[in-house]
Amino acid sequence: MLAFQLHQLQEIDTARARLQAEIHALEARLADHAAVEAAGQAVAAAKAALARARQALRSAEAEAEEVRLKIARTEQALYGGRVRNPKELQDLQREAEALKRLLAVKEDAQLEAMLAAEEAETAFQNAEARLQTLREERLQQEARWNGDLATSRQRLAALDERRRRLITTLPADALATYERLRERRGGLAVATVTDGACDACGAPLTPDLLRAARSPEALAFCRTCKRILYVP
Ligand SMILES: [Zn+2]
């Protein structure tokens, strides 16, 4: 009877330990916002990169436009009829040619800047979509985790109540022995006997010890792992 009661207490405590671990794990998950925070930082970085890419594109466009204006002015001078000196005309011709080569370079740079800005735009949109997905997933997860947490806490409270009622029926010395063993034996103070052997460590029981383990009042202990023996 005493071993049976301690076995019941052990079952309650094992279930409590499992629930406490579940509750801690759920609380840790709920407190951990790292994934959404990282995605938010990625969005901020992508937004800054996009702003830089757009600025670079505006600069490239302005530089190309400036060269185009210079070409227009040079050609106006060249074909406007005011300059008649052949040397000056030749200089203007050379300048116009040099400016057109420069314009080709500037237009290449402008095209590259445009492609880079498009890529930055896509990267920014992807980062934002990822953040949105993670936020939605997180909301669903949190709802599920909070539900699980409430259930686990209710179960734990019910077990705590069962434990309080059970220990009032136990002798103080038996309870003290149980608590001491539970602390020293990895949370398991009571070992069930199956086929004449201790379930916890596997050691076989002598016939005398098996008889002692069946006693309703006195406790018997496994000779190998020292746990309280319970024969179902
Ligand atoms: Zn044992």
Image: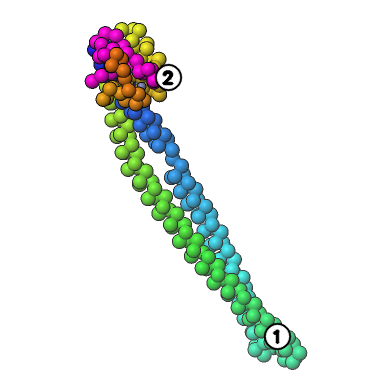
- At 65% from the left and 89% from the top, the residue drawn is 79
- At 58% from the left and 75% from the top, the residue drawn is 107
- At 44% from the left and 45% from the top, the residue drawn is 35
The overriding secondary structure of the stretch rendered in magenta is loop
- State the image coordinates of residue 86 (x, y, percent, origin top left): 74, 92
Mark 1 burial class by Cα count in 10 Å: few <14, some 14-19, many 20+:
few
- State the image coordinates of residue 175 (x, y, percent, origin top left): 34, 11
Identify the residue position indicated by label 1 in the image: 94
Does the rendering let one see residue 116? yes
Image mark for residue 184 = 2
Q: Quadrant of residue 190?
A: top left
Q: Quadrant of the N terminus?
A: top left
* CA gap, disc 2 and disc 1: 95 Å
Residue 214 magenta-highlighted: yes
Q: Quadrant of residue 202?
A: top left
Nearest to viewer (mark 2 / mark 1): 2
Circles 2 and 1 in contact, beta carbons < 8 Å: no
Q: Quadrant of the C terminus?
A: top left
- State the image coordinates of residue 69 (x, y, percent, origin top left): 62, 77
Q: Going by the image, does 43 lie left or right of 212?
A: right
